[in-house]
Image (cartoon, rainbow, N blue to C red):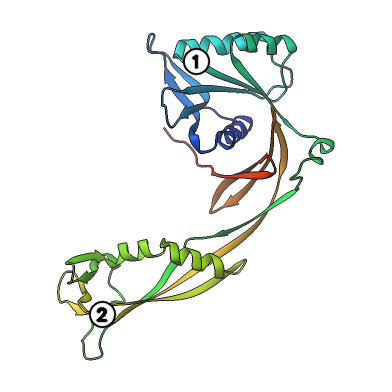
Amino acid sequence: MPRRTNPFQQLSASIMATVHASDYIVEESVIEVNKTTGVPREIDIYITSKKNPEDKTMVECRDWKSKQDIIWIDQLDGKARSLGIKKIVAVSSSGFYKTTLREANSRGIETMHVREAEKKDWSKWLFRIKKFGINIDFEPKVKKVNLVSPNDIIRPDLSKVNPNNVFLINLNDKKKISLYEYLKGLVKDPKIVAHVRANNTDEAISHYDYTVPCDRGVGYSVDGKTFIPLLQVIISFDSIRRTYKIPMRHILAGKHKLLVGKENIMGSDTRIVLEERKGQLVVMLENQAEKTN
């Protein structure tokens, strides 16, 4: 069964992920199989508690022009029962009839009306912004490595050598690591990340040189051959900071006040969702990747 989705379902999934924060896993377009009949059913949004995997919620979405009636509540109740799911949330872009709300409440089904807030409403919000500014410091990229040895040591030409074939060796503790793995870990070092974030310039490439002094007994070898002592390792790397000004939509999801925007970041669509909570903003960035079977 091919998985189906639409913009309203994607928006609802992002809202659910923001509202439930880090305590739950939120998945979109999940296939569940009826254990009795073996029939597969698709769930629009599936929410699972991280602490208790048996605590599951089925979220179904409808982007219709007309309000939702009791028939949909009947369908959701039957679908959830067939899959053994006890918690249900019905999300509608057009709202619900009063009789539908009473019926849903009697069955323990939560309803959520997701709609665009009118300016007269969101102009009273604490965070009534039209655009959200965000700076992203991309992971540093190593441009050059200089392995500095004593002057009287004959050093090999490393310009055409794969970093995977160069090993840094510490004879003192008898450890070694490929230069590639060492550099990969270095650019994630919290000290380097903090330094980059403090010194990067908006919309520019910043250049850095980082020197690592080496103790006696530290050196390197190429393809596991001759040990060459090191005095220091000098790494040159670049870091890029991008600045985004993202237009935001003002969304009311039940009692939740949210600002939602979308931007191409890092080569793919990223949705930004801000939820206003008691004088503060909860921020979620969601990198949207295509789901494959």
Foreground pick, 192 / 187? 192
**Quadrant in which the N terminus appears:** top left
Q: Residue furthest left?
A: 225
Q: Give, as a three-letter code, the residue at label 2.
A: Leu
**Residue under pointer 2:** 230
Residue 88 placement: quadrant? top right
Query: Image check: 141 left or right of 172?
Result: right
Q: Residue at x 41, y 26 (%)?
A: 53
Q: Identify the mark at residue 156; answer none if there is no mark.
A: none
Examine the rendered structure and indicate whether residue 185 appears above or below residue 8.
below
Residue 91 lies, in percent from the top left, at: 63, 23
212 versus 87 height, above or below: below
Which residue position is annotated with label 1? 86
Q: Secondary structure at mark 1?
A: loop
Q: For this rendering, which residue is in front, 233 or 63?
A: 233
Badge 1 amino acid:
Lys
Residue in view at x 50 percent, y 15 percent: 86
Q: Is residue 287 above or below residue 80?
A: below
Tell me if 85 is positioned left or right of 250 in this view: left
Mark 1 burial class by Cα count in 10 Å: few <14, some 14-19, many 20+: some
In the rendered structure, the answer to whether residue 61 lies left or right of residue 217 reads right
> Residue at coordinates 57% horizontally, 64% vertically from top-left?
241
Element at badge 2? loop
Residue 283 image offset from top left, x and y in percent: 60, 45
